[in-house]
Image (cartoon, helix red, strand yellow):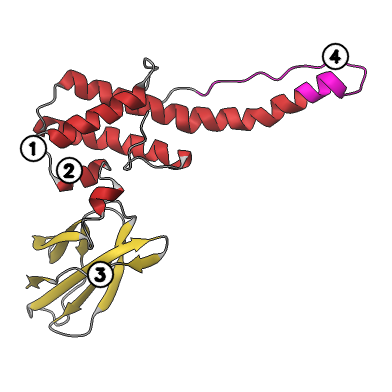
């Protein structure tokens, strides 16, 4: 099976990717020309793979040293009591997860290919599903984001919806009324809400934003173009 470049290389990261795919696919499926039956099958495959690569495999690995010790005791140990062999207890399946036929991950990769060819597919969808590979992401030297005013709880806030492609997150900076750039935060999930109060209560202000990629604790790449929002209350 060919490894897809959007699929994590580390086994420890794969259950998270699979569960995210299952969750996001349920959200985007109504917009795609893919049957509910095929969508449900892919979600079930993803949940099953996540269980096997996560909880089940972790339990197996924890049991392995115990079984090795038991074999050593049987073959070369000492004592006057019969060896009691340890029993492996399979972890319970999470709700909504059930065993699937062989080839679950192969079927998931096939479904991803169908999604990317669907007329309704967009980069934003691909980013949310986690199916944009490194080769595709290489065409994006900066994050992609939009900024708009949104009415919050009694105040207006700036809503920044961003696409980080295959990167861990984005570093966000802002400035108000032409002042100095300020560090606002690191975010790994869109959107980011700037809920700061106005500098002068009752006086509208212009807020500007820019972003760059953030990976492994370090900002990298170029800054985006600046986006502007006016906050007035």
Residue found at x 77% / y 22%: 71
Mark 3: which secondary structure?
loop
Kindly tell me whether residue 96 is visible in this rendering: no
Sort mark 1 into few (<14), some (14-19) or many (20+) by Cα contacts within 10 Å: few
Mark 4: which secondary structure?
loop
Badge 4 is on which residue?
82
Badge 3 is on which residue?
222
Q: What segment is highlighted magenta in the picture? A: 71-91
**Which tag is nearer the camera, tag 2 or tag 4?**
2
**Which tag is nearer the camera, tag 1 or tag 3?**
3
Question: What is the CA distance from the residue labelled 4 to the residue labelled 1?
Answer: 65 Å
Q: Earlier in the sequence, mark 4 or mark 1?
A: 4
The image shows residue 187 at horizontal and vertical percentages of 30, 60
Question: What is the CA distance from the residue labelled 4 to the residue labelled 3?
Answer: 67 Å
Q: Quadrant of the C terminus?
A: bottom left
Q: Which mark is residue 72?
A: none
Residue found at x 85% / y 14%: 82
Sort mark 3 into few (<14), some (14-19) or many (20+) by Cα contacts within 10 Å: few
Residue 95 magenta-highlighted: no
The image shows residue 158 at horizontal and vertical percentages of 14, 65
Kindly tell me whether residue 206 is visible in this rendering: yes
Badge 2 is on which residue?
125
**Which tag is nearer the camera, tag 4 or tag 1?**
1
């Amino acid at each position: 099976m060919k490894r897809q470049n959007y699929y994590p290389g580390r086994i420890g990261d794969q259950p998270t990717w699979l569960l995210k795919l299952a969750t996001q696919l349920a959200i985007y499926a109504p917009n795609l020309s893919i049957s509910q039956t095929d969508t449900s099958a892919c979600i079930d495959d993803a949940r099953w793979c996540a269980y096997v690569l996560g909880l089940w495999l972790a339990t197996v690995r924890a049991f392995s040293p115990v079984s090795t010790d038991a074999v050593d005791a049987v073959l070369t140990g000492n004592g006057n009591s019969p060896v009691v062999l340890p029993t492996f207890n399979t972890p319970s399946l999470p709700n909504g997860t059930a065993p699937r036929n062989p080839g679950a991950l192969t079927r998931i990769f096939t479904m991803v290919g169908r999604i990317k060819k669907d007329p309704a597919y967009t980069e934003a969808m691909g980013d949310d599903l986690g199916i944009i590979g490194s080769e595709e992401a290489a065409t994006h030297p900066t994050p992609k984001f939009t900024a708009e005013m949104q009415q919050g709880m009694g105040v207006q806030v700036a809503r920044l919806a961003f696409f980080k492609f295959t990167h861990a997150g984005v570093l966000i900076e802002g400035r108000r009324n032409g002042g100095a750039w300020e560090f606002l935060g690191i975010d790994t999930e869109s959107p980011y809400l700037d809920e700061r109060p106005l500098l002068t209560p009752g006086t509208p202000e212009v807020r500007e934003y820019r972003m760059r990629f953030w990976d492994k604790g370090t900002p990298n790449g170029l800054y985006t173009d600046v986006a502007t929002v006016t906050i007035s209350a």
